[in-house]
Image (spheres, rainbow, N blue to C red):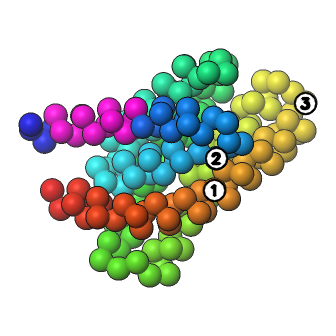
């Protein structure tokens, strides 16, 4: 398999993982391991693959959500927010040291979890509040709802990164 075909297969696989993990976490209040998957795609394979994984995976989820599809403006904000998590992974790829796992990596991964959560939920909450009004109350409620995802990502990012470090070492050395 050529390098380009291998990358396309990985993008498709990670996009499908987003959909599957979204299904599996649907019963949990706003706990989204998908942010880590998108971040990892950007970290492993670069900016464009990270953006594509976020956009394709979230596009699948918003279109085929078991609770019904999101209104178009909300869906677009979700897709853009998820794609930006892939871009964040790309930005962090030279900051995180794969050789050691010290407090610097831990702090960077906590920061990445917080930033991913905010770049997804702030625009989504703004669009949702703008559409469904009253704006202020709806936006505050949306941001309060995102606290579960924020806490989860503060735990998920350092934990899963450390568990998947052998994958990162192998993929980055290809």
Q: Are marks 2 and 3 in contact (CB under 8 Å)?
A: no
- Tell us which disc is closer to us: 2 or 3: 2
Residue at position x 60%, y 39% in the image:
25
Q: Disc number at residue 141?
A: none
Query: What whole-number distance in Å separates the C-alpha atoms at marks 1 and 2?
Result: 6 Å
Q: Disc number at residue 134?
A: 3
Q: Are marks 1 and 2 in contact (CB under 8 Å)?
A: yes
Residue at position x 77%, y 45% in the image:
145
* Element assignment for label 2: loop
- First-in-chain label (1 vs 2): 2
**Residue where numbered disc 2 is placed:** 31
Q: Residues within 10 Å of mark 2 (few under 14, many from 20)?
A: many
Q: Is residue 97 above or below residue 45?
A: below
**Looking at the rendering, which quadrant does residue 173 occupy?**
bottom left
Residue 160 appears in the picture as rendered:
yes
Q: Is residue 95 above or below residue 88?
A: below
Residues rendered magenta in the picture: 5-16
**Residue where numbered disc 1 is placed:** 152
Q: Main secondary structure of the magenta part?
A: helix
- Tell us which disc is closer to us: 3 or 1: 1
Question: Residue 118: percent from the left, percent from the top?
Answer: 64, 51
């Amino acid at each position: 398999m050529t390098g380009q075909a291998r990358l396309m297969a990985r993008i498709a696989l990670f996009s499908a993982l987003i959909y599957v993990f979204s299904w599996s976490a649907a019963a949990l209040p706003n706990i989204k391991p998908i942010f880590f998957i998108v971040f990892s795609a950007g970290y492993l394979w670069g900016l464009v693959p990270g953006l594509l994984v976020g956009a394709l995976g979230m596009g699948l989820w918003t279109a085929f959500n078991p609770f019904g599809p999101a209104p178009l403006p909300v869906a677009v904000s979700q897709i853009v927010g998820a794609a930006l998590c892939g871009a964040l992974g790309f930005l962090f790829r030279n900051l995180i040291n794969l050789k050691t796992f010290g407090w610097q990596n831990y702090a960077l991964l906590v920061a990445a979890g917080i930033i991913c959560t905010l770049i997804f939920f702030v625009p989504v909450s703004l669009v949702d509040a703008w559409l469904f009004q009253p704006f202020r109350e709806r936006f505050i409620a949306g941001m309060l709802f995102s606290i579960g995802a924020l806490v989860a990502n503060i735990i998920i990012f350092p934990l899963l990164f450390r568990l998947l470090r052998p994958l990162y070492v192998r993929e980055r050395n290809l």
